[in-house]
Amino acid sequence: MEYILISLDEALHTPEMSSTIFEAIERFNIDIDQDVSNFLKYKAQEHNDINLSSTYLFLVEDDYYDYEILAYFTLVNNKVFSVKNANPEDRDIIFINDDNNNHQAAILIAQLGRNSKYDTSHINLTGILNEIFIKIKDIIKLGGGRFIILDCIDDHIIRYEEKGFTKINRNRTNGLNTFIMYSKKLV
């Protein structure tokens, strides 16, 4: 399926798109994860406006509406603490250790989701991650982010491990699994 990848900021500041983008955001829904749907609807623009994060939309032309949002992701500049090697034989595998204050730049994939109106035949996790990695490579070229971090539900653990992420933690409060990847794997 043909799509346009565009930043939320650019879409909202393009006169011929802005009104239809607001409508597409309202229609966006992820049945299994309302938090991801609600972030796009209620927080993404605010976070973008104060430079807290950058959100990117996969837009498709629709017969009924001008545009629909196929999927989206949000990136955030972040930090990890006291990075140490988990296994001396594998220098690419890393873990977070909160024992001291050694900060390292990281890029957090804060949100990632596909509209429930579409399925993997339209775009799958690999397609979304390929676009994310292109954006992250651009950030790395500008000097940001030694690590890539993301949180996910149990259903996606194997998918992220297949993409080169390493599970480092499971949050007991929300049940999310934290994954990390050394950004040099992308370059």
Image (tube, grey):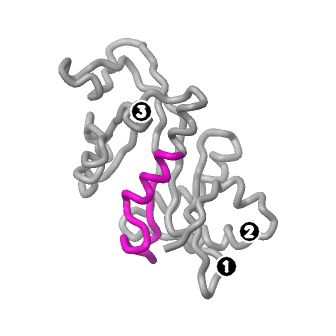
Look at label 3 and name its amino acid: Ser
Rendered location of residue 88, percent (x, y): 20, 18
User: Label 2 vs label 1: CA separation?
Assistant: 9 Å
From the image, tell me which residue sits under label 3: 183
- Nearer to the camera, 42 or 52: 52
The image quadrant that residue 60 belongs to is bottom right
Look at label 2 and name its amino acid: Met
The answer to whether residue 123 is magenta is yes
From the image, tell me which residue sits under label 2: 17
- Nearer to the camera, 50 or 121: 121
Which residue range is magenta in the image?
Answer: 112-134
Are there few (<14), some (14-19), or many (20+) residues within 10 Å of tag 1? Answer: some
For this orientation, the residue located farthest to the right is 15
From the image, tell me which residue sits under label 1: 66
Q: Earlier in the sequence, mark 2 or mark 3?
A: 2
For this orientation, the residue located farthest to the bottom is 64
User: Label 1 vs label 3: CA separation?
Assistant: 36 Å
